[in-house]
């Protein structure tokens, strides 16, 4: 059965939704693995400063879509532009530049277990930004730890941290490169409801502090409610609904409503 995309009333936000402030534009994106069509017709626009939540059941292609955005997976057809540039047409150097502006919090969010928090966070500075000044690196590490509320953890090992703290450090490691766009793949998975709420609130606070635009992939409805200016529902390779949390909760589409139960 073909389902048309239903656009529900948009929640009022202070984000300007117009053609001039688009940071990601995806049109008719398709991606298959062998015979398996995962992304059939993906259309999505992310505006500057916006928090866009993508909901979808397991295996619907959410992580695949986000990996196409960062150039980790090739797409078969359609268009995927980040800051106006078609990702698949970029050479290595151009892709590297775009990736510097993209922060990706992986679903697994792994830290290096043999390194302290400080070393984990300094790593992208020395490796990606080629930062040599140790004091400058420390200042950056402290700033970002403060932003995620874990200043005291600087000399801890990852194994000494709780799941929620590790998520925060993973987030800090992504933020330390000051990305303009954040891509969160299941930021609250595996956390208890209270810690999940704290991480969701942190996503909001970080947007304010760093003026990032974000795509947040989640099945955690509390996270969707807290973080999402706009929510899109992915099913069977396409988006089937779009709107605010309150609008989608009242959707005519049963599958959309089922997320809210
Ligand atoms: N590299 C790959 N090679 C082959 N198939 C893949 C690859 N990556 C993903 N898939 C398949 O694509 C489909 C979508 O996977 P994806 O990881 O995007 O789902 P998801 O929506 O993120 O699910 P979840 O909510 O469980 O994380 C799955 O059927 C998966 O097996
Ligand atoms: Mg996934």
Image (cartoon, rainbow, N blue to C red):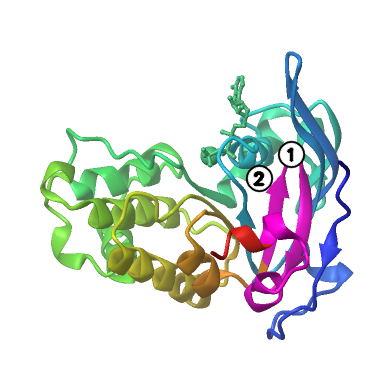
Q: Dot 2: within a 10 Å radius of its alpha carbon, few (fewer than 14), some, or many (20 or more) residues?
A: some
Q: Residue 106, percent across and down?
A: 46, 42
Q: Determine the residue positioned at 12% across, 52% down.
A: 155
- Assign the N terminus to one quadrant of the image: top right
Q: Residue 146, percent across and down?
A: 28, 70
Q: Nearer the viewer, residue 258 or 10?
A: 258
- Kindly identify which residue carries mark 1: 236
The furthest residue to the top: 34
Precedes in sequence: disc 1 or disc 2: 2
- Residue 143 in sight here: no
Q: Determine the residue positioned at 17% across, 33% down.
A: 114
Residue 187 sits above or below residue 49 on the image: above
Q: Nearer the viewer, residue 131 or 71?
A: 71
Ligand 1 position by quadrant: top right
- Residue 222 lies in magenta, yes or no? no
- Residue 96 in sight here: yes
Q: Nearer the viewer, residue 257 or 9?
A: 257
Instruction: State the extent of the magenta-drawn residues as a range.
Output: 231-256
Tell me the number on the disc at residue 98: 2
């Amino acid at each position: 059965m073909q389902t048309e995309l239903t656009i529900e009333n948009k929640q009022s936000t202070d984000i300007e939704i117009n053609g001039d402030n688009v940071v990601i534009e995806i049109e008719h994106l398709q991606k298959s693995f062998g015979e398996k069509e995962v992304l059939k017709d993906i259309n999505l626009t992310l505006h500057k400063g916006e928090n866009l939540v993508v909901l979808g059941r397991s295996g619907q292609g959410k992580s695949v879509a986000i990996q196409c955005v960062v150039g980790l997976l090739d797409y078969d057809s359609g268009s995927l532009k980040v800051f106006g540039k078609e990702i698949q047409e970029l050479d290595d150097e151009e892709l590297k530049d775009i990736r510097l502006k993209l922060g990706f919090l992986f679903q697994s969010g792994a830290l290096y277990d043999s390194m302290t928090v400080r070393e984990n966070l300094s790593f992208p500075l020395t490796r990606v930004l080629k930062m040599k000044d140790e004091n400058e690196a420390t200042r950056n590490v402290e700033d970002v730890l403060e932003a995620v509320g874990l200043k005291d953890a600087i000399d801890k090992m990852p194994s000494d941290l709780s799941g929620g703290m590790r998520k925060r450090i993973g987030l800090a490691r992504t933020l330390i490169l000051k990305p303009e766009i954040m891509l969160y793949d299941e930021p609250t998975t595996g956390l208890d409801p209270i810690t999940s709420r704290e991480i969701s609130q942190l996503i909001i606070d970080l947007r304010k502090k760093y003026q990032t635009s974000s795509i947040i992939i989640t099945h955690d409805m509390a996270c969707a409610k807290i973080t999402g200016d706009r929510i899109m529902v992915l099913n069977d390779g396409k988006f089937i609904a779009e709107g605010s949390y309150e609008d989608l909760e009242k959707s005519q589409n049963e599958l959309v409503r089922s997320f809210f139960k």
